[in-house]
Image (cartoon, grey):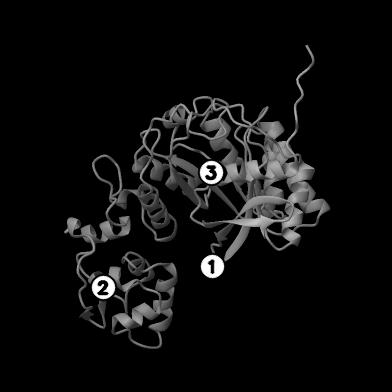
């Protein structure tokens, strides 16, 4: 019997497969607008990612490979799902990105991967791609590089030296929940330890005056393992305190056809939105996990933001915006870090007396009006947006 003939997908086919499957993983709020672009000799997906300092950057988000040794029942790269598999060689992917960058279609790269045949081999391919961009092509722009669970220390070290941001998807808040989502993966050593290594290397390189990734992030799958919001946010807070985790992202579970979890219901995307808002309260607003408005099951309200729910329960006296501290202002719904800083700057020159003054400073006055005083006077009351909480 003659041997089977295997036809390797061409570059255009690889790009179509691996950029589309990378798009399936999107959970970043910064990746807010996906737009399919016409690319010379290829078709791919580019994303407008919001910068933390404002503005946006166009990212090319792609997988090195969609093959994976793991059979995680929620994941689109699971080896338990029959689908077409392909892999970018480092030179192929680097050349593709350089072309997009020179055509001014992509400003930065977001590189992830399935894991095959093992963590080290996967990490080596990804690093080879990034090295070709940094060292051969001279690319100095933004690169976000995923770390692979179980990869050796020297690979984590190299990733931190080459990328602007590194991340590793914890997927679950603790080992018990991970056994449901990814029973072949190990939480403490293979995953958490790699994030801790990344933080260690960042601090060492910064102390030596060497370039290093600016931040570390992670991502959780929400709704497939029975976890509560409190479980997720306790893990987030601990990571913020111990490894200075920059951001946490939440992917509302949606079932994938022919996967072991195909019969599970999709998670409400509003739940993920509330987790993002609560994560920001921990990271930017000075709240602790103990202050978050969990119900008896450890979950956040769905019908309002967690900050609104906290304010209804605790802000019994309105806050005078002309004298309040930064921390007091940040506890008022509708006032964020930027608008709070503007209030403090402007009130040195003038007294704030009406809602239009606040609106011009970026305050959401519909949310803030019920909780503030303006020069000793209550703002005009708005009809409640959340009567169920009264």
Q: As displayed, is residue 23 above or below residue 329?
A: above
Q: Earlier in the sequence, mark 1 or mark 3?
A: 3
Q: Nearer the viewer, residue 277 or 113?
A: 113
The quarter of the picture where the N terminus appears is: top right
Residue 127 lies, in percent from the top left, at: 73, 42
* Residue drawn 64% across the image and 41% down it: 17
Q: Quadrant of residue 115?
A: top right
Q: Does 363 sit left or right of 372 as displayed?
A: right
Alpha carbon distance from label 1 to label 3 = 25 Å
Q: Which mark is residue 369?
A: 2
The disc at residue 54 is 1
Residue depicted at x 43% and y 40%? 253
Sequence-wise first label, 3 or 2? 3
Helix, strand or loop at mark 3: helix
Hey, which quadrant is residue 149 in on the image?
top right
Q: Is residue 181 in view from this perspective?
A: yes
Q: Position of residue 325 (x, y in %)?
A: 35, 71
> Dot 3 surroundings within 10 Å: few (below 14), some, or many (20 or more)?
few
Q: Is residue 46 left or right of residue 90?
A: left
Q: In the displayed image of the protein, which residue is found farthest to the right? A: 136
Q: Nearer the viewer, residue 273 or 232?
A: 273
* Left or right of 86 in this view: 238: left
The circle on residue 24 is 3
Residues under labels 3 and 2: Cα distance? 40 Å
- Secondary structure found at label 2: helix
Furthest residue toward left: 390
């Amino acid at each position: 019997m003659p041997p089977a003939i295997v036809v390797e997908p061409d570059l255009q086919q690889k790009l179509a497969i691996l950029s589309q499957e990378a798009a399936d993983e999107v959970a970043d709020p910064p990746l807010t607008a996906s737009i399919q672009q016409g690319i010379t000799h290829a078709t791919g997906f580019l994303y407008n990612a919001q910068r933390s300092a404002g503005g946006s950057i166009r990212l090319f988000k792609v997988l090195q490979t969609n093959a994976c040794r793991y059979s995680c029942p929620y994941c689109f790269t699971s080896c338990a799902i029959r689908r077409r598999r392909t892999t970018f060689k480092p030179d192929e992917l680097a050349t593709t990105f350089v072309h997009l960058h020179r055509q001014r279609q992509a400003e930065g790269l977001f590189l992830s991967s399935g894991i095959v045949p093992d963590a080290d081999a996967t990490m080596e391919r990804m690093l080879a791609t990034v090295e070709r961009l940094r060292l051969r092509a001279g690319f100095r722009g933004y690169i976000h590089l995923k770390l692979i669970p179980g990869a050796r220390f020297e690979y984590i070290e190299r990733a931190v030296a080459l990328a602007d941001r590194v991340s590793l998807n914890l997927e679950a808040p603790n080992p018990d929940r991970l056994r449901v989502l990814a029973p072949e993966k190990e939480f403490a050593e293979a995953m958490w330890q790699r994030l801790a290594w990344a933080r260690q290397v960042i601090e060492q390189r910064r102390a030596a005056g060497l370039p290093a990734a600016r931040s570390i992030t992670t991502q959780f799958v929400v709704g497939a393992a029975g976890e509560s919001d409190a479980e997720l946010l306790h893990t987030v807070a601990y990571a913020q305190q111990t490894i200075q985790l920059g951001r946490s992202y939440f992917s509302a579970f949606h079932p994938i056809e022919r996967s072991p979890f195909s019969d599970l219901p999709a998670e409400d995307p509003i739940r993920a939105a509330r987790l993002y808002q609560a994560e920001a309260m921990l990271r930017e607003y000075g709240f602790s996990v103990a202050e978050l408005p969990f119900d008896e099951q450890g979950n956040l309200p769905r019908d309002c933001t967690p900050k609104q729910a906290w304010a209804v329960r605790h802000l019994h006296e309105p806050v005078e915006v002309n004298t309040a501290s930064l921390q007091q202002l940040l506890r008022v719904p509708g006032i964020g870090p930027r608008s709070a800083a503007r209030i403090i700057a402007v009130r040195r020159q003038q007294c704030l007396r009406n809602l239009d003054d606040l609106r011009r400073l970026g305050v959401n006055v519909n949310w803030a009006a019920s909780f503030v005083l303006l020069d000793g006077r209550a703002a005009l009351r708005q009809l409640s947006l959340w009567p169920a909480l009264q």
